[in-house]
Image: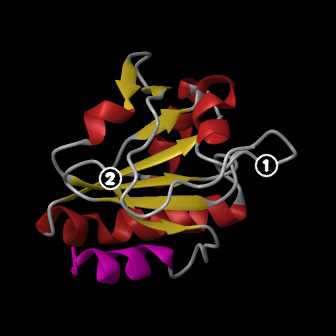
Amino acid sequence: MADLPQQGQSLPDVDFITEDGGTFSSADLAGQKTVLYFYPKDDTPGCTKEACAFRDRIGDYDSAGIRVYGVSLDSPESHRKFREKHGLNFPLLTDKEGRASELLGVLSEKGRARRVTFLLSANGTVARSYPQVSPETHADEILSDAASL
């Protein structure tokens, strides 16, 4: 498994699948500060807490000029159901076959994404990595850290 990208490094060239079946590339993240958070599975207790925390703070993220994307290996259909059930107001991306998770060092031994977040600067490089995340407080932590970018 690869190591997590470090501060100042660009993300490897990886593609994700959007909820409508389109393709979204890591290159599409450049140009605006971005939170790219990986999580294990849709609609599980910790993942729901984390997603809802981002949902509840999305106005603050928007005001700060920061996009938020959640990523797991779940299907686009699973993401749609998860977003609708919990009123999530940001995109969820599918890491088809775990390629991005593997290249970014977040793939677990169980074949799921670990709970890891990347805060990306507007130039597309990693401003900060969060290898250990508390689902309840993570959205607040990142927003605070992003203010210094």
Main SS type for the magenta part?
Answer: helix
| Residue that appears at 68% across and 24% down | 97
Q: Report which quarter residue 23 is drawn in.
A: top left
In the image, taking residue 104 as reference, residue 118 lies left or right, namely left
In the image, taking residue 50 as reference, residue 58 lies left or right, namely left
Circle 1 Cα neighbour tier, 10 Å, few/some/many (<14 / 14–19 / ≥20): some
How far is mark 1 from mark 2, CA to CA?
23 Å
| Residue 43 is a magenta residue | no
Q: Quadrant of the N terminus?
A: top right
Residue 78's place in the image compared with 123, above or below, is above
Which label number is shown at residue 108?
1
Which region shows up in magenta?
A: 138-149
Which label number is shown at residue 125?
2
Q: What amino acid type is highlighted by mark number 2?
A: Thr
For the residue pair 35 and 4, the one nearer the viewer reads as 4
For the residue pair 49 and 120, the one nearer the viewer reads as 120
Measured from the top left, where is residue 82 in percent x and y?
55, 43
Q: Report which quarter residue 144 is drawn in.
A: bottom left
| Residue that appears at 34% across and 48% down | 90
Measured from the top left, where is residue 100 in percent x and y?
57, 34
For the residue pair 61 and 24, the one nearer the viewer reads as 24
In the image, taking residue 4 as reference, residue 61 lies left or right, namely left
Q: Quadrant of the C terminus?
A: bottom left
